[in-house]
Amino acid sequence: MEAGIVGLPNVGKSTLFNALTQSKNAQSANYPFCTIEPNEGIVPVPDERLARICKYIPPQKTVPAILKLVDIAGIVKGASKGEGKGNAFLSHIREVDAILQVVRCFDDPNIIHVAGKVDPLSDIEVVEIELMLADMQTLDTALPKAERAAKSGDKEAIARAEVIRKCQAHLATDQPLRKLKLNPTEQKVISSFGLMSMKPILYVTNVDETDLEGKGPMVQQVRAFAEKVGAEVIPVCAKLEAEIAELEPADRQEMLNASGLTEPSLAGLARAAYRALGFQSYFTAGEKEVRAWTVPVGATAPQAAGVIHTDFEKGFIRVEVYGLDDLETHKNEKAIRAAGKLRVEGKAYVMQDGDICHFLFN
Ligand code: GDP
C-alpha cells in the first residue's frame, strides 16, 4: 500500500516527510522485507489488537502493518500542461494508491505562500484541478482508440468507450472522478488508466502548534469541504512532529505529554490512510512472530494468503480462523480448538477484519 504526499510549495511537505523518515534507519532495520527509496518513508499503522494478541501468544517479535509514503514534489498551477515538474509529478501520482495532500493551515508571516496568502481551499482547488485536467487528457487520448476498436465489434472496446464517455461527462461537471459511481465491471475496465482524481485523497492540514486538534477556522473550512467530496482530514503540526521524531524514543513520550498528544499525529495519519483506502487487517500469530497483514475489504482467503507470499495463493488449501475475542476468552489456541471455536474455511471465505489465521497450503 502506497500513498503519495503532494502539496503546493512551502506548505510543509518536506518537514512532514522528514518527520516520517527521521527514524528511517531504525525503520529499515525493522522492515527488511521492504525496499525503501530515498524519496520514500515507512510508517507503521498502529493497531492496539497486536498487543492484545501478544498478551496470550508472546512472540519474539511483533510486526505491524505498514504504510509506504512517497514524497511527490513539484505541483504548481499548470502542472497538467507541463509547468514546473508537471509531467514527472503526474506520472508519480499515477502509481500510488492514495493521495495525501498537505494543506497549509499555519500562519507565519516569515514563510511565503506561493499564492500570496494562506488559503487552504484555494490550495486544494489548485491540486484538484490539475488532477482533473490530467484525467481529461488521458480520457481524450483514450477515447478515439477505444472507438476505433469498438467499430470492429470488439466487445471490451465498446465497454471501454462507454466508461470513458461516462467519466468525461462527469469531469465536465467540474467534479473529481472520486465521486462518480461505477459498478465493479466499469471499475475494472477503467482501472488501467491510472485516473488521478479517482484516487482516495486525504487532507493533511498542517496546523499551528496552538491548534493541534484542528479547531481553528481554516481546518474547519477544509473539514466542511472534505465532507462534500468524501475525503478525510487529519490535522498535523509538521514542525512539532519533526521535533518529536528527532528525539530519542524515551524522550518522545514526555514531549507528547507536554504537547497534550497521546501519540504522534503521524500514527493517526497512517490509520486514516488505511481507512480511506478501504483496507483491513488480519493477523498471523505464533511464537516467532505476531504480525498484521493488509488486505482490501472483501478479499478472499486465498487472496489474503497471497499477501504473505504469492505462491500461497495458488497453493491455498484451507485456513483455520479464530477471533481475538475467542483468544481472550479461552487464553490459548489449544483451548479455542477444544471449545470448537477454531473455524476451518475454504477458498470462498471472505476475510473479516481482525481474523487470526493459520493458512494451510501445498
Ligand atoms: P514544502 O515546500 O511544502 O516542502 O515546505 P517545507 O517543509 O520546506 O516548509 C516550508 C517552511 O515552512 C519551512 O521554513 C518550515 O520550517 C515551515 N513550516 C513547516 N511546517 C510548519 C508549521 O507547522 N508551522 C510553522 N510555523 N512553520 C512550518
Image (spheres, grey):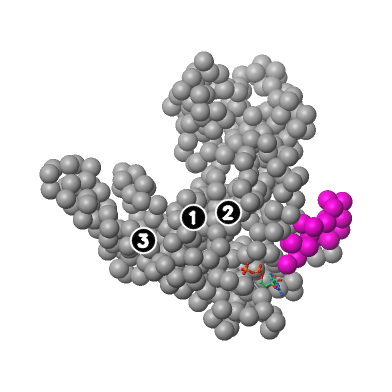
The reply to whether the residue tagged 2 has its Cβ within 8 angstroms of ligand 1 is no
As drawn, 194 above or below 354 = below
Left/right placement of residue 195 relative to residue 201 reads: left
Instruction: Determine which residue is flagged by label 2.
Output: 70
Instruction: Determine which residue is flagged by label 1.
Output: 92
Instruction: Determine which residue is flagged by label 3.
Output: 135
Quadrant containing ligand 1 reads bottom right
- Secondary structure beneath label 3: helix
Q: Residue at x 48, y 61 (%)?
A: 89
Disc 2 to disc 3, C-alpha distance? 21 Å
Q: Residue at x 83, y 56 (%)?
A: 247
Position in image of residue 227 (x %, y %): 50, 65
Residue 354 image-quadrant placement: top right
| Residue span colored magenta | 239-256
Q: Nearer the viewer, residue 229 or 76?
A: 76
| Other-residue count near label 3 (Cα within 10 Å), few / some / many at <14 / 14–19 / ≥20 | many
Mark 1 vs 2: CB contact within 8 A: yes
Q: Is residue 285 visible?
A: yes
Residue 142 image-quadrant placement: bottom left
Tell me the kind of residue under disc 1.
Answer: His
Position in image of residue 228 (x %, y %): 46, 67
Which callout, 2 or 3, points at the residue further toward the start of the chain? 2
Q: Nearer the viewer, residue 340 or 215?
A: 215
Which callout, 1 or 2, points at the residue further toward the start of the chain? 2
